[in-house]
Amino acid sequence: MALKDQIGSFCWWSLMTKDVDKANDFYQKLFDWTLGEMEFPGEEENATIYAASKGGFGNPVPLEKDFPAPSHWIPYITVANVDETCEQVEKIGGKVCVPAFDIPTVGRTAVITDPLGAAFHIFTPDDKEENMNMIGNGPGEVCWMELMVDDPAPLLPFYAELFGWQFSEPMPMNGGEYTSLKVNGEGVGGFLKRPPNVPSMPPVWMNYFAVASVEAGAEKAAALGGKIVMPKTEIPETGYFALIEDPTGAVSYLFELNS
């Protein structure tokens, strides 16, 4: 598939973690991921690659123990040209936090924040025919992306102009509102207007990982040293989710689709 048809796709996720070994052990046992290796020119150590049924989709990146933010996941979003997109970002209210740089043999990337401060990578692959959409429904795959903010409305023009995302009309959900997003016609995520009973917090893009059973997955996460931050909760006519924290402090959702 040509790159021009995949602009705006979620294509990769890095786990910024303060304990790579502990995180790798946790996720491999929780989701049965394959932990592979990739060699990069000029690097002394190979990179660990997380893979589920669709193939490689992520990697751990070590953080210093005294890094001011907790461990966290950060997504990569496909663009046609990283450098040109960086210039565009600054003009429409975002910021370039990490300037564009090359990942040898893989592509070019930069770290961006949107107008409310949520961070993500933009990425252009060296292989322009590669399938960049890594949202999936297989076990352990990222099946949905979500950003919770006080008010999503100011963000929609930013993401629409940057990536060509399409948005639904807001609908009520759990005391807030939900705006779903589509990439090239496929639903892959959404924006949640913060419900009144949820404390205000810095905006961050959140991963939903597909599981056969949210209840069993959350219990397994706890047994492996993680925490259940929010227990199994129903999304009417859709499925169930739970919020978990891994042993290094990174949070993500488990999601079970109604059968």
Image (cartoon, rainbow, N blue to C red):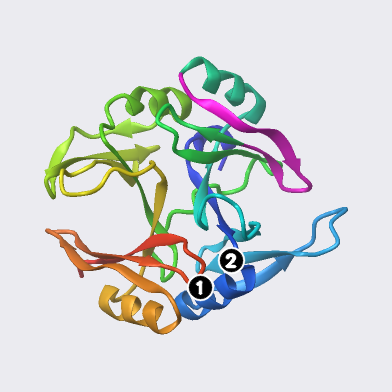
Q: Which residues are magenta?
A: 93-110
To which residue does mark 2 refer?
50
Which of the two discs, 2 and 1, labels the residue nearer the N terminus?
1
| 189 relative to 184, above or below | below
Q: Main secondary structure of the magenta part?
A: strand
> Callout 1: helix, strand or loop?
helix
Disc number placed over residue 195 in the picture, else none? none
Is 41 one of the magenta-colored residues? no
Q: Can you tell which quarter of the image residue 38 is in? A: bottom right
Q: How many residues crowd mark 1 within 10 Å: few (<14), some (14–19), many (20+)?
A: some
Q: Residue at x 14, y 39 (%)?
A: 171
Is 107 one of the magenta-colored residues? yes
Q: Residue at x 58, y 72 (%)?
A: 24
Q: How many residues crowd mark 2 within 10 Å: few (<14), some (14–19), many (20+)?
A: many
| 23 relative to 105, above or below | below
Name the spot of residue 189 as percent of width and height, x first: 34, 46
Q: Residue at x 25, y 47 (%)?
A: 199
Mark 2 residue type: Tyr
Name the spot of residue 246 as percent of width and height, x first: 45, 69
> Callout 2: helix, strand or loop?
strand
Q: On the rendered structure, is 45 left or right of 79? A: right
| 127 relative to 35, above or below | above
Q: Residue at x 11, y 45 (%)?
A: 175
| 112 relative to 190, above or below | above
- Between label 2 and label 1, give the one nearer the viewer: 1
To which residue does mark 1 refer?
27
Name the spot of residue 147 as percent of width and height, x first: 35, 43
The answer to which of 142 and 202 lies nearer the viewer is: 202
Given contact means CB atoms under 8 Å apart, are the residues at marks 2 and 1 in contact? yes
The span from disc 2 to disc 1 (Cα, nearest Å) is 9 Å
Mark 1 residue type: Tyr
